[in-house]
Amino acid sequence: MNHLDDDAELYVLGIIAPERAAEIEAHVASCETCRERVIAAEAAAAALAGALPPAPSEAATTERLRTTVGGSASRQRSWFAGAAAAAAVVLAATAAYEGSAAHAASSRLASTNTALLAMAASHFEHVSLTTPPGMVAKAIYARDGAWYYVVVSGAPPGGHVRVESGGTFRDVGALVPGTPATLFVRGVGRVAEIDITGPGDATVARGIPSY
């Protein structure tokens, strides 16, 4: 197996196929370079997690993850992937490395401002979308536009995500309900704008990625 590409970030966010996750876990056990990349991605996601306000269900999610002992990363990830809260993802990924060198290094990163530096050095970016009161939205995305992960707290009923490229807007899918609501999109390339639409196809949030 070659060194990890953007799959390192997708692994930390919990949005990758289980078979690929198993390959990554086996690889990082013996590859220091890729292990450090996963650790940096964890720290970057931890920094991003603070951008969303806490939701009632997140407290229970956090407590369950903190009290989980043992178990595989894949099994933990299958439990919380639907919630897709960045903070929960980071906690689960860290729990998977409990007792390992990777976990120790991750703990050192989390205890310093290195988390913020890792966010700048990682292979994904993020942009806050302009939203109405009571709604917070962010888009996390690969620098090459290979994938986008939209996270919305207080999403409108039936919310959709659309992107603008070359002056043309297109709908890329409905937000998956949850706390927060999310949508993971691949294959759209670099876009000029990311919008969230609500009832009547009205635009309720927008953001401009920078690459």
Image: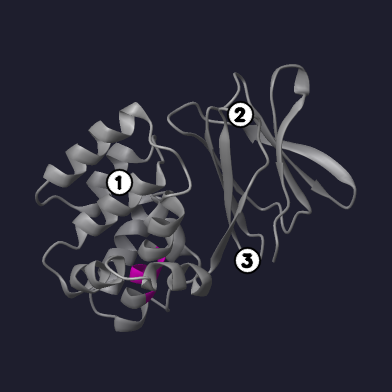
> Mark 1 = which residue?
77
Label placed on residue 133: 2
Whether the residues at callouts 3 and 2 have beta carbons within 8 Å, the answer is no
Q: Specify the quadrant of the image occupied by residue 64.
A: top left
Q: Amino acid at mark 1?
A: Arg
| Residue 121 within the segment the image draws in magenta | no
> Mark 3 = which residue?
143
Give the residue displayed 62% in from the left and 20% down from the top.
158
In this view, the residue in front, 190 or 192, is 192
Circle 1 SS class: helix
Quarter of the rendering occupied by the C terminus: bottom right
Whether residue 16 appears in this view of the structure is: no
- Alpha-carbon distance for marks 1 and 2? 32 Å
Label 2 neighbour load within 10 Å: few <14, some 14-19, many 20+: few
Q: Amino acid at mark 2?
A: Pro
Q: Nearer the viewer, mark 1 or mark 2?
A: 2
How far from the left and from the top, in percent, is residue 71? 14, 50
- Alpha-carbon distance for marks 3 and 2? 29 Å
How far from the left and from the top, in percent, is residue 208? 73, 52
Q: Residue furthest front?
A: 133
Circle 2 SS class: loop
How far from the left and from the top, in percent, is residue 197? 71, 29
- Alpha-carbon distance for marks 3 and 1? 24 Å
